[in-house]
Amino acid sequence: MQTNTNPSGPQSQHLKGIALTAFGVLILTPDGLLTSLVSADVRTALFWRGLFMGLALTAFVLLRHGRRSGAAFRALLTWPQLVIALFFAASGIGFVVAIVTTSVANTLFLVACAPLFSVILARVFLGQRTQLRTIIIILVAMAGMGVIFAEGLGRGELRGNLAAVGTALTWAAMVVVLGHAQIRDPAPALALGGYIIAGVSFLVAPTIAMVALDFAWIAILGFFVLPVSFFLIGLGPQYISAPEVSLIMLLEAVLGPLWAWLFIAQAPSEMTILGGVIILATLAVHFAIGLYRDRTAGK
């Protein structure tokens, strides 16, 4: 029996999707720390986040496509690109609304429902079936999130809780559309999403003025962390399923607190460490099994 050495085989493609998404999430993990360092009104910060991200991704498209940039931006007139931009903007705005109006624990736990929503949306609208193993992994990972935030979970504000659910739902929908439409370059749609975030925030922000230090933190986020991370994450659905992309996104909640621990001495609690270990071990087992099956299928 010969081994399939085709570099574009299922194992290679699966591994590529995992690597792209995981690398994107790793770049995104300082988001919470940098956001906490900004003293400006959250609506003002959201305006500059969206604007800087939109500008950075626009510049990336121009540099990447050169004279063909016009065609890349005209693709925004197609329904998948517009839907992706709207869902991306809605998830970004919903997350901030949730953080402001309910507890952080409630927000992050409810947003962790995104993988489950991905399964449901893919099944209802696209007829896609998800392996039972993936569904079990999602439930175990959500239990791990529950362990992390058990101490802070509460009823919270209904508006904030609904915003968190809406964030998970719109993020899941965006990832499902990305995978279904096989968008090769998500940058134009994400740039438009950034501009939508900036436009909505501009209408409600008390001011767009910020102190210089706030601009510095937002610039790091808007020009590097957010565009690079979301572009890489946006490539993931070409190679792995939407639920798997959303599962890997849970790493942000696990690894994000480490930045606060390293730079502002906010040590994670024992429950946070335990929940993080549960999630990391669950994801490791899931993807190890998936890669092993891809490898044996290619033989």
Image: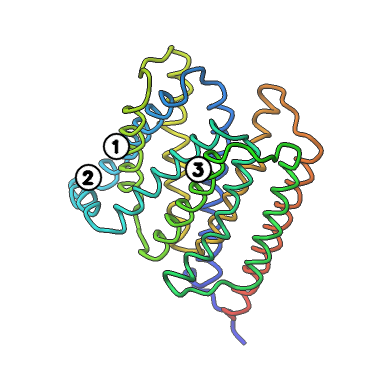
Q: CA distance from mark 3 to mark 2?
A: 39 Å
Residue furthest to the right: 270
Q: Amino acid at mark 1?
A: Ala
Query: Which mark identifies residue 66?
Result: 2
Q: Nearer the viewer, mark 3 or mark 1?
A: 3
* Image quadrant containing the N terminus: bottom right
Q: Residue at x 44, y 61 (%)?
A: 176
Q: Residue at x 51, y 17 (%)?
A: 39
Left or right of 254? Residue 42 is left
Q: Residue at x 72, y 23 (%)?
A: 265
Q: Nearer the viewer, mark 3 or mark 2?
A: 3
Q: Residue 190: where, in percent of width, then height?
A: 36, 45
Using a 10 Å C-alpha cutoff, classify the residue at mark 1 as few (fewer than 14 neighbours), some (14 to 19) or many (20 or more).
few
Using a 10 Å C-alpha cutoff, classify the residue at mark 3 as few (fewer than 14 neighbours), some (14 to 19) or many (20 or more).
many
Q: CA distance from mark 3 to mark 1?
A: 31 Å
Q: 162 or 137, which lies in front?
A: 162
Q: At numbered mark 2, what does the secondary structure look like: helix, strand or loop?
A: helix
Q: Which residue is mark 3?
A: 163
Using a 10 Å C-alpha cutoff, classify the residue at mark 2 as few (fewer than 14 neighbours), some (14 to 19) or many (20 or more).
few
Q: 68 or 136, which lies in front?
A: 136
Q: Which residue is mark 1?
A: 59
Q: Amino acid at mark 3?
A: Ala
Q: At numbered mark 1, what does the secondary structure look like: helix, strand or loop?
A: helix
Q: Residue 171: where, in percent of width, then height?
A: 47, 51
Q: Residue 31: where, in percent of width, then height?
A: 54, 33
* Image quadrant containing the C terminus: bottom right
Left or right of 180? Residue 100 is right
Task: Mark 3 and mark 1 in contact? Answer it, CB < 8 Å.
Answer: no
Q: Amino acid at mark 2?
A: Gly
